[in-house]
Image (cartoon, grey):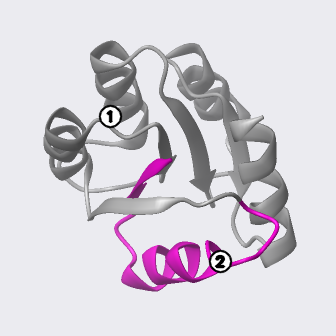
Amino acid sequence: MKLLIVDDSSIIRGRIARILSDPRLPEIRIIGMARNGVEAVGLSQQFKPELVTMDLTMPEMDGVECTEAIATLNPKVNILIISALSDKATAIKALKKGAKGFLYKPFTDEQLIQAFLEMID
């Protein structure tokens, strides 16, 4: 399974990447890490990920707009929103634009592992 990690925080990108080594998860290969939505759309076009983790608050193109663009490119993609934004309306908007799940920051390793397992089932 190919994963694209989209977050403007290098700490979060690194943390998500580290969690992928958990033995409960199937093999997930990172095909790219994007700092903003513009980078994410370009990487999606190039590598066609099956799974995307998406921050909502980013420079250049926010997560809702980016979710819509990636879901349009590949309607079968599984997008997991991971955001500190507690605004439910924005979360719902992202889900309507094609996201399949939502996880609030800060999250535990266990929460992220469970979210991945639900997304790829």
Quarter residue 112 falls in: bottom right
Position above or below: 26 against 60 = below
Mark 2 and mark 1: Cα distance apart in space: 24 Å
Position above or below: 31 against 96 = below
> Which residue is at 54% across, 59% downward?
28
Is residue 117 or residue 38 the one in the foreground?
A: 117
Position above or below: 29 against 38 = below
Q: How many marks?
A: 2
> Which residue is at 40% across, 41% downward?
63
- Give whichever of discs 2 and 1 has the lower sequence position: 2
Identify residue type, mark 1. Cys
Q: Is residue 108 visible?
A: no
Position above or below: 21 against 121 = below
**Front tag of 2 and 1:** 2
- What element does badge 1 sit on? helix
Judge whether residue 4 is colored magenta. yes
**Which portion, as a residue range, is magenta?**
1-25
The x and y percentages for residue 8 are: 34, 68
Quick one: quadrant of the C terminus?
top right
Q: Is residue 15 visible?
A: yes
What residue is disc 1 on?
A: 66
Identify residue type, mark 2. Ile
Residue 19's disc number: 2
The x and y percentages for residue 82 are: 60, 54
- What element does badge 2 sit on? helix
Relative side of 42 to 93, left or right = left
Judge whether residue 23 is colored magenta. yes
Does the CB distance between marks 2 and 1 fall below 8 Å?
no
Quarter residue 114 falls in: bottom right
